[in-house]
Image (cartoon, rainbow, N blue to C red):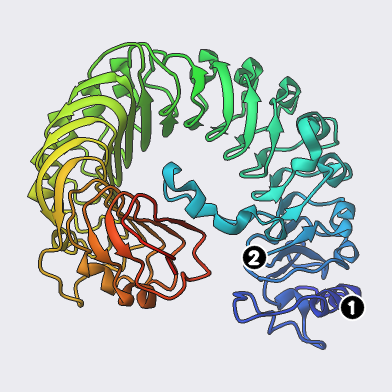
Amino acid sequence: MPVPCLPDQSAALLRLKRSFTITNDSQCTLASWRAGTDCCRWEGVRCGGANGDGRVRSLDLASLKSWARHWFERLKHLTHLNLSDASIQGKIPVGIRHLTNLVSLDLSTTFYLIDQDDYYLSFGTWSDPSWWVVEPNIGSLVANLSSLRELYLGRVDLSDNGEDWCTALTNSSTPQLQVLSLRHCRLFGPICTSLSSIHSLTEINLQYNDLYGPVPDSFADLHFLRVLDLADNDLEGLFPKRILQNRNLTTVHISYNTNIYGSLPNFSPDSSLTTLIVSSTNFSGPIPSSIGNLKSLNELGVASNDFRQELPSSIGQLTSLKLLEATGAGIVGTIPSWIANLTSLVLLRFSNCGLSGPIPSSIGNLKNLTRLELYRCNFYGTISPHIFNLTHLKVMYLHSNNLTGTVELSSFWKLPHLFSLNLSGNRLTVVDGDVNSSHVNNMDILRLASCNMSKFPDALRHMSFIHYLDLSDNKIPGAIPQWAWETWSQLVLLNISHNKFSSVGCNALPVDIESVDLSFNQFEGPIC
C-alpha cells in the first residue's frame, strides 16, 4: 500500500497554504488541503516512490494567482515545482534556492503577442515594474540546484544581472540542464560562447529580449539541441550555417533580428526540422528548392533581401505546413498557384516583400486559416470575395498595398471570429454597408487609416471591447458621436488625426485612454 503523507510534509504544506491569498481568479484553490487528510492526495501534490514514500516530490500550483514568500525550503525533497502563471510579484522566495533536489523549476508567466506591430498592445502595462517578479542574481538562484534539468523563467525580470547574466548562469552548478527558457526576461548583452559548455542542453529559448552580438558558432556543437529560439532580439552578424545543418534540430526560430544575415543551406531528407523561421532577418541568397525535402515541416518563415527570386515551387509539397511566412524585397513575383495545396495552413504572412499582383481567389480554399497577413507588399486589385469564405479568420492584415475598390465593413462581419482588421494605406474606399448589431464583430483592433472614409462608421456603436482604433487620414467631418465614449470603455489607443472633426463630442476625455491623437482636424477652442 502507498505510504501516506508524512506529518512534517503535511505541516509544511499547510504552513505554505496559509501564506497564500486565494482569489476569485485562482484556478487552483487548494480546497483539498485540509489537516487530517493525506497530503499526497491533495490538489497539485505528488509524493515519491513507486508506491509513494510519503514525501512530497512534485508541487504544481500553476495559475494559483497568488504568491508565498516563505516555507518552500521545508519541502526539501521536491523535484518538480511549478508556479507558472501565479501573478507573482517581487523577488523569488529565498527558500527555492535551497531545494537541492529540484529537477524542474517553472516560474514563468504565459503571454501572447498578437503581432509584432501590436507589441505595445500585447504587453501593455507590463512596463510597470510591479507586474514583474525580479531575480537580480540568476547565478545565485541556481547555484545549489545541481540536479536541475528544466528552468522556465519566462517574464521574470533578469535585467539587474546586466551583461553578465550568461556567464553567471554557465558558472553555476547546473551540468545536467536540458531546458533553458528565458522568454521576455529583459535580458541584454551578448550570448556567451560558454553557454555551449552545458552539453546536455536540448532547448534554448531566449525570445523577446534585448540581446545583441553574434549567435555563437559553438551552438552547432550541442549535439542534443532540439530547439533554438532566439527570435525578437537585436542579434547581429553572420548566422552560422553549421547550426542549420544539425540534423537533430527540430526548431530554429530567429525572426525579428534584422541585423542577422546569412543564407539557407541545402536540406537533406533526413533533417528533423519541424519549425524553420528566419523571416524578418537580413538573410539573402537563394532559397533552395531542397527545402521541399523537409516533409515534417509545420512552420516555415523565409527571407530574401538582396537576392531576387520567386518562392520555390517545392514549398507547395509541404502539405503539413501550418505557418508560412515570407519577407524581404528579394522575394518577387505573384502569390504562387501552389499556395492552394497548403490546406493545413493556419497562418499565411507575406509582408515587407516584393510580391505583387492581385490576391488570388484560391486563398479562399485555405479553410483552416485563422490569420491572413498580406501587407507592405505590392498587391493590387480588389479584395477577392473568396476571402470571406475563411470563416475561421481571427486576424486579417491587408494594409500598405495598392488595393482598390469600395469595401463594405459589413462584409467582414461574415467572419464571426475576426477581432483584428487592418486595411490602412491602400486606395480603398471603406463604407459601413448594412449595419446589423446582431452581426457586428466586437473587434479588438481596427485600423482604417487612409481609407477615403467620409462618415463616422456606425458599426463602431457595437464594438464595446475595442482597444485600438485608427481612423486617421480620412475625411470624416463633424463631432465624434456621444455614443462612442459611452461604448468604448476599454479603449487604450485612439488615432483620429488628419480628418475634419470639429468636436470631440464629450465634456472630458476618458482617463483610461493611454494615447489619443487628435491632431490636424478642425477643432476650435478647448477640446474638452
Left or right: residue 160 versus residue 522 is right
- Look at the image and tell me whether residue 297 can be seen: no
Give whichever of 227, 501 is nearer the camera: 501
Left or right: residue 309 versus residue 24 is left
Task: Report x, y in % for residue 156.
Answer: 70, 50
Q: Secondary structure at mark 2?
A: loop
Q: Secondary structure at mark 1?
A: helix
Disc 2 + disc 1, Cβ < 8 Å: no
| Residue, disc 1 | 7
Label 2 or label 1, whichever comes before in sequence order: 1
Question: Tag 1: residue type?
Answer: Pro
- Look at the image and tell me whether residue 257 can be seen: yes
Residue pictured at 66% horizontal, 17% vertical = 218
Asked if residue 317 is positioned above or below residue 285 in the image, the reply reads below
| Residue, disc 2 | 62
Residue pictured at 28% horizontal, 63% vertical = 417
Asked if residue 254 is positioned above or below residue 511 in the image, the reply reads above
Q: Closer to us: mark 2 or mark 1? A: 2
Q: Residues within 10 Å of mark 2 (few under 14, many from 20)?
A: many
Q: Which quarter of the picture shows residue 77?
A: bottom right
